[in-house]
Amino acid sequence: MATNFVEFRRDIVALLQTLRLSLDRPYRDLSLSGADGREKYTRAMLLVEEARIKFNSYVRQRHEPTEQEWHHARDIVLKFLNTLLHSPDVEPEFYQRRFRIPSPRIDRENLSSLTVALSDGDFTIGEAIIRYIEAIENSRVAGSIQIPLDFGELVKIVPRQQVAPAKFEIVDSRIVISDGAPKRLEEDTKNIDAALDHIVGTGKNLIESLEQSNCDRRLLESVKELHKQVTQDGNIVKLGLTNLACGVMCSQFERELPDALCATFNSYNTSISMYVAQFPEWEQFTQRAASIEIDDESIVEIDLAASEVIEALEAQPELADPEVPKTIKLVRELMSHPGKSAKRAAFAMLKTIENLVSSIVRHSIVALNKTAEKTVEAISSAAAQVITGLLSIALIAASGIGPAAVNAGAPWVDKITATVREQIEALAKP
C-alpha cells in the first residue's frame, strides 16, 4: 500500500470508485430486481458511501494526517473491506468481476504500483480486495482487525480457474482433467487448421527418423509426447511449454544428430511455436508469466509442493483420475530445464496447482450448500468423507504454494488455508 498520504488517499479513492461502479452494474435495471433487489442495492451502495465519508473525514485536509489520523483512516478502509466480503447484500458474481480502475476518472499516474498492477492485471475484485487488506494489515500503523471468512464465503475470493497447463473438475466425487479444444479466433481458423496438418505430418516423419537413428531415447520420448499433444488438440499452454522443453532437450543432444535431422527438428519446433502463438490463451499465459518474478527459492518451493500434491493424489485414487497426477508430473518435469524455461514452467506449475485448489474449494462449497439445512450435520457420512478427502488435498496444495502464490499475485491461496482447515475439522466431528 502507499507509504505517503497523497498516494494512499488516491489509492483508496480509486478503490472506492471502482467498487461503487462495479456494484452499480448488476442493479442498473432495477425493474428486474424487485423490491428485495432494490433494498440490497441500496444497502450495498450505502456501505461504500459510508466508508467514503468516514475516510474523507480524516484525509480531506491538505496537510498530512497525524499518526492517529493515519491509523483511523486505514482502519476505516480495512473494516469496510472486511464488511464488504461478508455482506449478504452483495451477489457472489460481483467478486468474480474483473478489477478495473475507471480511467480517465482517476489519475492513474499518481497511484501506487499495487493499484496499477491490480488494475492492469487479470485480477478479480475478490482478489483485489484481499490484496488491499493484506497491504493495509502490513502497513506500519494499521491494526489487524480482519474477520475470518466462513467456508461458504470463500467463493467470493477464490477465482475461477485460469489459463494453465491443466484445468480440473469434480465428476462423481472424483477429480478429472477438464481441458477441451483451445479457444481460437474465427478469422484464424483456416490458418490454424492448415498449420496443424503440416505439423502432424512433419511430426510423424521426425519420429520415424529419430527411431531409425541412434539418438538418446529421452529425446525420442520427448518428441513422441509432443506429437501426442499436437494430435490431441488439447491444452494449448501445456503444448507450448512441452515444445519449449523439447527444444531445450534437442539442443543438448544436437551433436549426436545428423545435420538434416537437426534441421527437421528445428523446423518442427518453430512450426509449433508459431502454431501456439495463434491462440489467445498462449499469449495471455506468456504475458502473465513474463510479468511475474519467480526466484530460485520459489522454484524449489513450487517443486516441493508439486511433489506433495502428486503423492497425495496417488495415495487416494478413489478421489482422482490417474491422468490428474500424471499431468502434474509432466508439468513438474518441465521445471528441470535450465534458465527461463524453468521459471516459465514454475509459473505454469503454480497456476496448475491454483486451479486444482480452486476446483476443489468451489465444488465443496456447492456440495455443502446442496444439503437441506445447509449444515454439516445434514451431510451423510459418505459425502462428508469425500469432501474431507478433497479438501485435504486442497489444503496440502494451498499450504505448499502459499508464499510463492502471494509473490505471484494470488494471495487468496494463502488466505484460505485456515478456513479450509477449520472446515475439515468440522466435517470430522461426529
Image (cartoon, rainbow, N blue to C red):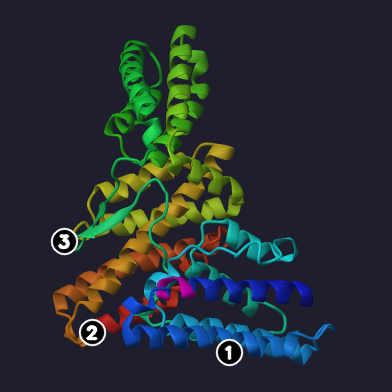
Q: Nearer the viewer, mark 1 or mark 3?
A: 1
Residue identifier under label 2? 374
Q: Which amino acid does the dot numbered 3 rest on?
A: Asp
Q: Nearer the viewer, mark 2 or mark 1?
A: 1
Which residue shows up at 30% across the image and 14% down it? 208
Image location of residue 359, percent across then percent down: 32, 62
Which residue appears farthest toward the right when viewing the image?
A: 63
Query: Is disc 3 placed on a helix, strand or loop?
Result: loop
Query: Is disc 2 placed on a helix, strand or loop?
Result: loop
Image location of residue 380, percent across then percent down: 14, 79
Tell me which numbered mark, 1 or 3, is placed earlier along the sequence.
Answer: 1
Which residue shows up at 65% across the image and 61% down it? 116
Tell me which numbered mark, 2 or 1, is placed earlier along the sequence.
Answer: 1
Q: Left or right: where does residue 154 sit relative to residue 301? A: left
Query: Image quarter for residue 96?
Result: bottom left
Residue identifier under label 3? 172
Q: Is any atom of residue 148 visible in this view?
A: no
User: What is the magenta range?
Assistant: 23-27
Q: Residue 319 carries which label?
A: none
Q: Indicate yes or no whether the magenta region holds residue 25.
A: yes
Q: Which amino acid does the dot numbered 1 rest on?
A: Glu
Give the class, few, some or many, for how many residues have Cα within 10 Å of label 3's Cα (few <14, many ≥20): few
Labelled pair 2, 1 in contact (Cβ < 8 Å): no
Image location of residue 413, percent across then percent down: 46, 66
Q: Is any atom of residue 259 visible in this view?
A: yes
- Work out how far the residue at label 1 is from the one at label 3, CA to CA, in angstroms: 46 Å
**Closer to the camera in the image, 13 or 259:** 13
- Work out how far the residue at label 2 is from the one at label 1, CA to CA, in angstroms: 32 Å
Which residue shows up at 18% across the image and 59% down it? 318
Query: Is disc 1 placed on a helix, strand or loop?
Result: helix
Vertical placement of residue 226 versus 285, above or below: above
**Closer to the camera in the image, 191 or 376:** 191
